[in-house]
Image (cartoon, rainbow, N blue to C red):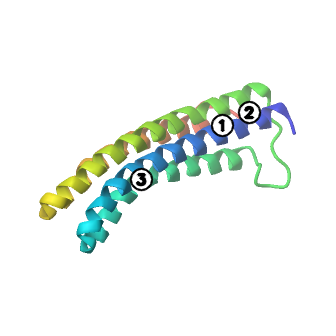
């Protein structure tokens, strides 16, 4: 395996790994608070589940970008593209915007969603407001994904 492909695989690890860490922490933050509420009011499970699932989307963005890297250099085909080390490094670096934005937004979205569980506990009629507040943070993960996609498809020329 060439060094340039190893750089791409490191980019894959950055994208998928950081996004999964952010989502895991965000979901755990919300689910922990939600479990406390469910111990007293189990009928609120659907709303707690919705709030807890919100931070999981960051992992999907990281995974999507990881697949795009694999497809872009042909690693899912029988014969990968021959790319220079410079292109491999550029592809690796393109994973940072999505990886970092998903890591941080996943954590903060979990914090906001866990506060939403507190809203659900006291004023269940306002749960939609809690979901909207948590969803606002989602946009920052999308911004990171868009920048990473622009780098791969517009900013980095392969061959």
Q: Which mark is residue 11?
A: 1
Which comes sooner in the sequence, label 1 or label 3?
1
Q: Given contact means CB atoms under 8 Å apart, are the residues at marks 3 and 2 in contact?
A: no
Q: Quadrant of the C terminus?
A: top right
C-alpha separation, residue under disc 1 versus residue under disc 3: 24 Å
Q: Quadrant of the N terminus?
A: top right
| Residue at the top extreme of this rendering | 86
Helix, strand or loop at disc 3?
helix
Q: Quadrant of residue 86?
A: top right
C-alpha separation, residue under disc 1 versus residue under disc 2: 6 Å
How packed mark 2 is, by other alpha carbons closer than 10 Å (few <14, some 14-19, many 20 or more), is: many
Which comes sooner in the sequence, label 3 or label 2?
2
x and y, in percent, of residue 103 in the image:
48, 39
Helix, strand or loop at disc 2?
helix
Looking at this view, is 48 or 150 the one in front? 48
Q: Which residue is mark 3?
A: 27
Q: Quadrant of residue 119?
A: bottom left
Query: Residue, x 78% and y 36% (percent of image)?
Result: 6
x and y, in percent, of residue 36 in the image:
30, 59
Helix, strand or loop at disc 1?
helix
């Amino acid at each position: 395996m060439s060094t340039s492909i190893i750089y791409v695989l490191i980019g894959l690890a950055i994208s998928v790994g950081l996004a999964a860490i952010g989502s895991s922490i965000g979901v755990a933050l919300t689910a922990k608070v939600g479990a406390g509420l469910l111990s007293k009011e189990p009928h609120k499970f659907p709303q707690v589940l919705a709030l807890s699932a919100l931070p999981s989307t960051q992992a999907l963005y990281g995974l999507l970008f990881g697949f795009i890297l694999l497809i872009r250099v042909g690693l899912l085909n029988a014969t990968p593209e021959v790319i220079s080390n410079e292109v491999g490094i550029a592809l690796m670096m393109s994973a940072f915007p999505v990886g970092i934005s998903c890591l941080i937004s996943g954590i903060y979205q979990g914090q906001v969603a866990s506060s939403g569980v507190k809203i659900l506990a006291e004023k269940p009629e306002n749960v939609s407001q809690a979901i909207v507040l948590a969803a606002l943070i989602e946009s920052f993960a999308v911004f990171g994904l868009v920048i990473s996609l622009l780098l791969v498809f517009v900013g980095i020329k392969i061959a």
